[in-house]
Image: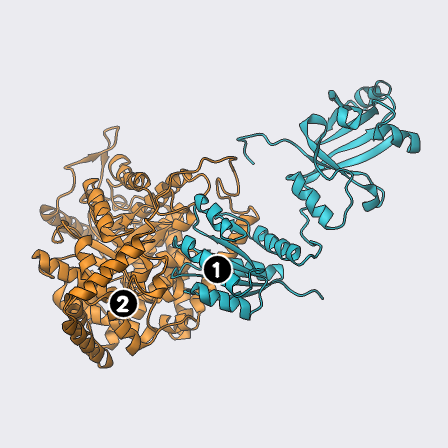
Amino acid sequence: MEKKIRVLVAKPGLDGHDRGALVISQALRDYGMEVIYTGLRQTPAQIVAAAIQEDVDAIGLSCLSGAHNELFPEVMKGLKERGADDIIVIGGGVIPWEDIPFLEQAGIQKIFTPGTPLQETAIYIEKAVRERDGLPVTGNVTPPERIDHIGIAVASLDEVLPFYVNVLGLTLEAIEEVSTQQVKVAFLQIGNVRLELLEPMSDQSAVAQFIAKRGQGVHHIALGVTDLTERIAELKAQGIKMIQDQPVPGAGGANIAFIHPASTHKVLFELCEKPVVKGGVS
Amino acid sequence: MNKHHDRIKKWKLATEKGMQRFPERKETFTTSSELTVDRLYGLEDERYPMEKLGLPGEYPFTRGIQPTMYRARYWTMRQYAGFGSAEETNKRFRYLLEQGQTGLSVAFDLPTQIGYDSDHVMAKGEVGKVGVAIDSLEDMEALLRGIPLDQVSTSMTINAPAAVLLAMYIVVAQKQGVASHLISGTIQNDILKEYIARGTYIFPPQPSMRLITDIFAYCKEHVPKWNTISISGYHIREAGANALQELAFTIANGMAYVEAALAVGLEIDDFAPRLAFFFNAHNQFFEEVAKFRAARRIWAKLMKEKYKAQNPKSWQLRFHTQTGGSTLTAQQPDNNIVRVTLQALSAVMGGTQSLHTNSRDEALALPTEDSARIALRTQQIIAHESGVADTVDPLAGSFYVEQLTDEMEQGVANYLDKIEALGGAVAAVEQGYMQREIHHTSYETQKAIERGEEVIVGMNSFKMENEPQPELLRVDPSLGEKQKEKLAALRNTRDQNRVSAQLEALQRGAQGTDNLMPLIIACVESYCTIGEICGVLRQEFGEFTGV
C-alpha cells in the first residue's frame, strides 16, 4: 500500500479562529491523508519543529488576523534553515489578493482564498506532493462533464444530409470548414448533444484516412470539459497518450484535443471546451 | 370580555405612566397611507397566548423587555471598531460619533486580548492588526481622549484580561473627573465561549471564573451601571454552530456564570440585572427572529423559576446583536450589504438592544471608512425609513414565527438536559462536548455548500468572471516597532518601585481569596503593563492549553 500523505495544519500567531483549520483538517482526512493539527497560538519556530518531527509532506497555514505577511515567511525561513524546504507549504484565511504575490515569492506554494472548495485543496496538495516525489499523479482526474457531440465520418455531406434533415427531421444548424482538421462539418442538434457530420476536404485529412481504412460511420465521441489544458495535463499524468498535447481550435469556436485510441481501447475520444460566455451565470 | 382584561388594563396604565418619563418618538405613528400604527397588536384577540408571550416589558418578555420598545428609543447603533494605535482608533471613534453613532465598541488587538505586551515574542506580526494595541494606562488615555465618558457608553470586546481593561477604563474616567458609578458600558468577559469557539483564553477555567465573579462583586458596589459580562453566542455561531446550538450553548454558559456567582456567596439579584447577552444574526430571517424571542422567554423562566430571582430586571435578557461575519463572501463583496440588511432587520424584529452591522469587505480585510459608513447607514435606514420600529414585536402572532419560537425553546431545553448530564457547561467545555457538536455542524454545512445544496449567491452560484478588486484597509506594519518604543520609554519613566510593589500585592491577592479588582486597579494606576499584570496571574493560575 502506498504511504499516506501527511499534512500539518497549523495556526501561527495569536488568532483563535480555527473553524477553517478544523474543517480543512477533516476534509483532508476524509480524502485519505494523515493530518496533524497543531492547535492555536503556534510560533513559526514551533510549526517548523512540529513539521520536521512529524515528517510531514505538506503544511497548511491558517491565519485570519492579518499577520500572515510576517508569520508565513518566518515559517519558510525556518524550514530553509533546517533543510526542510522540500515540505510543501500552502496558506489560507483572510488574505487580501494583493498580498498573494509577496507570499508566493516567499515560498508559499499556493494561497487559497475564502470560498475554495475543500476537495480542490486536497487535490492540490496531493498533486504537489506527487510531483515533488516524481510519482505519477493519480486519482485526481476531473471527469468530463457531458457528451458534447458525436462525430460521424461521411464521404459527402450532400449525399447524407437528406437522411438527417428530411427523414429524421433534425435541424441543420450550420456547415463550417475546420482547416486544422481538413474537414467540412455539418452540425445537427439533438437535445443537449450534437451530431457532427465530417466530410474530408483533402486526402491528408484524418477523416479521409479513416474512411479509406474503415469505411463511413461513427468516427469519434466528444466529451465536454472545462480547463482543457488542465485536463490534458491530468490525463498525461495518468500515462494517457494524446494526439494533441495542446488545445487546438475545433469547430464552433471550441478548443479541442484528441486522445489517442491506443490509450482508449480503440475508441476515438475528443476533449472539447466550449467558449465561456462572459458575465453569464453559472 | 377578554379574560386578560385586567392585566392588559394595568399594563396600559403603567405604560402611559412610564411614558411621562420616557416619551415615545412621536405623538402618533402613521403609515404612508395615514393609517394609524398602534403600539401593540393582538390584545383584543380572545386567543392571545398570554402565558407564552406576556406583554412587552413583562414576564416572560417574549415580546421585548420594554413596553414601548423602539417607539420610545431606537436600539443603540454600536459599530465595533479599532485598529492600529490608540491615537488612530480615537480618530475613528470621533468620526463614528460625528456620524451619528450612539455608543462605542472597542476592538483590541490579539496581544492585548491574550495579555501580552506589544514587545512580547508571541506578539510578533499581531500588534494593532485586528484591533487597537493597549499596553498600559497610557494607551487607554490616548484611546479615550476627548470622549466624554459620562455620556458615551462603551463596549469592550475583552475576555481573559477583562478585569485589567475595565480597571483602565475606570481610572481614565476618574482622571477625566467622572466617578466610577457614572460610567456605563460592557465588557465581554465571557471566558467559556473562548474555550469553545474564539480562542483568546489565558488561564484555566476555574481561576477564570474567579476573575469573573470578582468583577461581578466589585461592580455591584462601585460601577453599578456597567454590564459585567456579555454572554456571547456570536462566536459560537461563527465557529459553525447553527441557530439552535448558538442559543443553547449561550444559555448553558449563562447558567454556569450564575451558578459560579451564587457559589461564592453573591445574591442573585445583586448581579443578575447586569448580565448582558450577545447574539449573532445570520440569513434565515424567521429563524433568527424566533431565536431572539425564545432567548428572552427561556432566560426569564430560568431566572425566576430555577434561580428564584425576585427583581424583574434579573429576569430580562438584554442583548447586543452583530450580523454574521461568516456569512459574508469574498466574492462580489457588495452583495454583503444586502445580507447585512436582512440580518440587521431580523435583529430589530427580534428586539435587540444594540446592533453592529458588518461591513461588506470583512471577508477580505478590516473595513475601510467607506464600508464602515455604509454599514452604519444600513441601520439608520432600517430605523428611520422602513417604519418597522413603529410598533412593538410586529411578527408576534405569526403562526410560523410563534411555532419556531416554541421549537427553539424546546430544542434548547433538550441541549440543557444533555449539558447538565455532563456536569454543567464548565465540565462540558472541558470535555470538548460543545466544540465537537459545533465542528460537526460546521463540516456538514461546508459539504452541503460544496455539493451546491446550499446556495451562496456569488460564491457557488451566480458567479462572475474578472471581478474588480476592491480597495482594502491596510494597518501600518511599522506600528509594532512604534508600540515597542513607546513601551520602552514608559518602562524608563514610571516609578519602578511602585510598579513592583503593586505587582507583588496582586500576586499575594491571587494566592488568597480577596477580590482582585482593587489590586488590579492599583497596578493600572502605577502604569503596570497588561503583560506584567497578566504575567503575575499566569504564574499563580497557570495557563490553559486547549482541550
Label ID, residue B14? none
Label ID, residue A77? 1
Left or right: residue B497 compared with residue A185 = left
User: Toward the viewer: B412 or B534?
Assistant: B534
Task: Report the residue at 81% width, 26% height from top.
Answer: A198
Q: Position of residue B160 (x, y in %)?
A: 29, 66
Q: Residue furthest left?
A: B177
Quarter of the image for residue B542 reads bottom left
The amino acid sitting under disc 1 is Lys
Residue labelled with disc 2: B531
What shade does chain B have? orange
Q: Position of residue A222 (x, y in %)?
A: 75, 36
Task: Report the residue at 78% width, 44% height from top.
Answer: A241
The mark lying in front, picked from 2 and 1, is 1
**Chain letter for mark 1:** A
Q: Quadrant of the C terminus of chain B?
A: bottom left
Is residue B53 visible to the viewer in this orientation of the structure? no
